[in-house]
Image (cartoon, grey):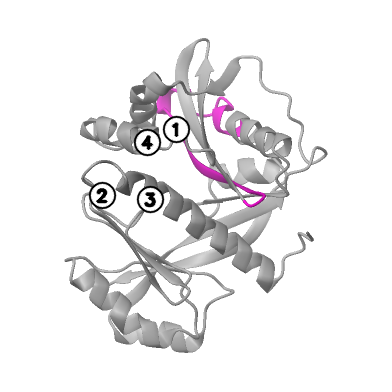
Amino acid sequence: MSLILTEELARKIEQSEIELLESRLTGVQKIEGNPMGVEIKKFGDAVAFYVKNIPGPSFNNVKGLSGDQLDEIGAILDFYHERGISANFEITPAHCSAELFQLLSERGYFQRSFRTALYGPATDDQVDLEEDGSISIREFEDDEFAIFGQIYTKGFNMPSSLIDFVAQNNQVLHHNEHWTFYLARIKGEPAGIGVLFEQDGIATLAASATTPEYRNKGVHSALVKKRLQQAQQNHCHMIVGQTGYGSGSLRNMERAGMKVAYTKAIWTKL
């Protein structure tokens, strides 16, 4: 598979994002009684994700909407309106059109931010996989997800009351063959987490967080390298990830041999 960026490859990268979120939320949905209130609904090629008890745009968004699916927008907006929230649209350059942006604007939406998607080949000669000797990385054990929740909430400046929630919603994926969870330690102390999602030969850097006291010590970079190594060992042909534009995470991915695929537009309600 050629990794020269084309519209087709950009769509594959976007589809891998959709598959990742669908896999994650399907796992959460299968918790007895669906306590998070997960719903996933398709509108043509677009997929609307809704999680009643997880506020914010991270899980309540629309992916895969294209400029030739304008007739689906009304139904999508109704889907979210019926659930008491506004939609959030993630629109890639491969899918955009002036007509799509105009229609969203007419319905009271505006572009709030950007998010960058990166990609690269998962081949042995792309990055030096030698790790910093002060950083150790291994997979999580089944009874360690409280630590995952602690690092994740600290890393993203979330309330500590969400630790158990984060732990449960990731532990449910621990035995899923597509997911791998990594714990990074510095001198034996938990310092960071990294998650890898693999499907159809594409490996995705699904999530990563470092606690504030261990930032700027190479933890995130080491977790990127570890997951790239895993992707190589599992014969994936491509690795992808997304992050904030111009962020330190983006720079670490570029140092590992990845490059920018596109920067998508995030549209939300006024």
The mark that comes first in sequence, 2 or 3, is 3
- Find residue 5 and report its horizontal and vertical position in percent: 72, 65
Residue indicated by mark 2: 54
- Find residue 150 and report its horizontal and vertical position in percent: 34, 26
Q: Does residue 270 appear anywhere in the picture?
A: no
Q: Residue at x 21, y 65 (%)?
A: 85
Q: Nearer the viewer, mark 2 or mark 3?
A: 3
Question: Where does the C terminus fall, quadrant-wise?
Answer: bottom left
Give the quarter of the image for residue 136. Answer: top right
Give the quarter of the image for residue 229. Answer: top right
Q: Residues within 10 Å of mark 4 (few under 14, many from 20)?
A: some
Helix, strand or loop at label 3? It is helix
What is the CA distance from the residue labelled 2 to the residue labelled 3?
14 Å
In the depicted structure, whether residue 38 falls above or below residue 76: above
The mark that comes first in sequence, 2 or 4, is 2
Q: Which residues are magenta?
A: 200-221
Residue indicated by mark 1: 174
Q: Is residue 127 left or right of residue 44?
A: right
As for residue 154 lying within the magenta part, the answer is no
The numbered mark at residue 26 is: 3
Q: Residue at x 45, y 20 (%)?
A: 141
What is the CA distance from the residue labelled 1 to the residue labelled 2?
20 Å
The numbered mark at residue 172 is: 4
Dot 2 and dot 4 residues touching (CB under 8 Å): no
The mark that comes first in sequence, 3 or 1, is 3
The amino acid sitting under disc 3 is: Thr
The amino acid sitting under disc 2 is: Ile
The amino acid sitting under disc 1 is: His
Q: Residues within 10 Å of mark 1 (few under 14, many from 20)?
A: some
